[in-house]
Amino acid sequence: MADEIQNAEAAPEATENTGAPRRGRGGRDGGRGGRDGGRGRRDDRRPRDEEGGEELIEKLVHINRVSKTVKGGKRFGFAALVVVGDGKGRAGFGHGKAREVPEAISKATAAAKKAMIRVPLRDGRTLHHDGRGHFGAGNVTLRSAPAGTGIIAGGPMRAVFESLGVADVVTKSVGTSNPYNMIRATFEALGEQTSPKSVAQRRGKKVSDLIKRGGSSDRAAEAEAAAVTE
């Protein structure tokens, strides 16, 4: 009996001297819900383009809810319109439908990433020239603007220029307020944008020759042509 009591008293001492302290399932140093990893980690990073590995700007423009009356009641569906851009001259829009809002947004985002177009920008902040776009009942007018003007656009058009990376532009939309028609008309106008380099290459001339026709001197035309990056 005395031997059992001595062994029981010695057991805690052996436990204290052997190994590190025990950790629970969700301890600080690991585990499924740990601070350093596992399923409980929160990821707040911006979405990246899987192909290029670059960060993209996503803008939710419009969500439309529709209902269908069936035998058991009403069945709801959602349609999402999303604009995606990299802020450096590439943008696209997409449309997705689903029974739930998150699924509709993910479908629209995937469609927008596949339909991105490249738009040449002057100094990385505004358009090279004015443009017009038409789709359905929507008519939009785009005008380049000096530095400090900002984005003078409303509704869906502002989302397009913010995701595109345009900082100075003046726009006007007439005919309709339908976001789908406005977005399509805006992208039609952006698709017609050209840069001085592309025009000079197509015509077999130098960029300074095109700028000189506007009344600039030779030295000023060469300096302005050298400043053209796209």
Image: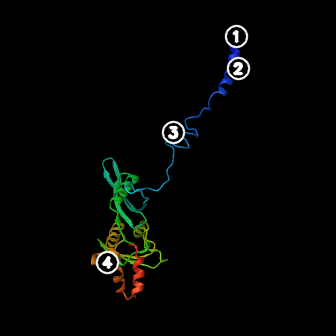
Q: Earlier in the sequence, mark 4 or mark 3?
A: 3
Specify the label residue 9 is tagged with. Answer: 2
The quarter of the picture where the N terminus appears is top right
Q: Residues within 10 Å of mark 2 (few under 14, many from 20)?
A: few
**Location of mark 4 (residue):** 200
- Indicate the amino acid at tag 2: Glu
Nearer to us of marks 2 and 4 is 4
Q: Residue 88's x, y, as percent?
A: 42, 66
Q: Amino acid at mark 4?
A: Ala
> Residues under labels 3 and 1: Cα distance?
45 Å
Q: CA distance from mark 2 to mark 3?
A: 36 Å
Q: Amino acid at mark 1?
A: Met
Q: Quadrant of the C terminus?
A: bottom left
Residue of label 3: 32
How far is disc 2 from disc 1 in space, using C-alphas? 13 Å
Q: CA distance from mark 2 to mark 4?
A: 93 Å
Q: Earlier in the sequence, mark 4 or mark 1?
A: 1
Mark drawn on residue 1: 1
Who comes first in sequence, dot 2 or dot 3?
Answer: 2
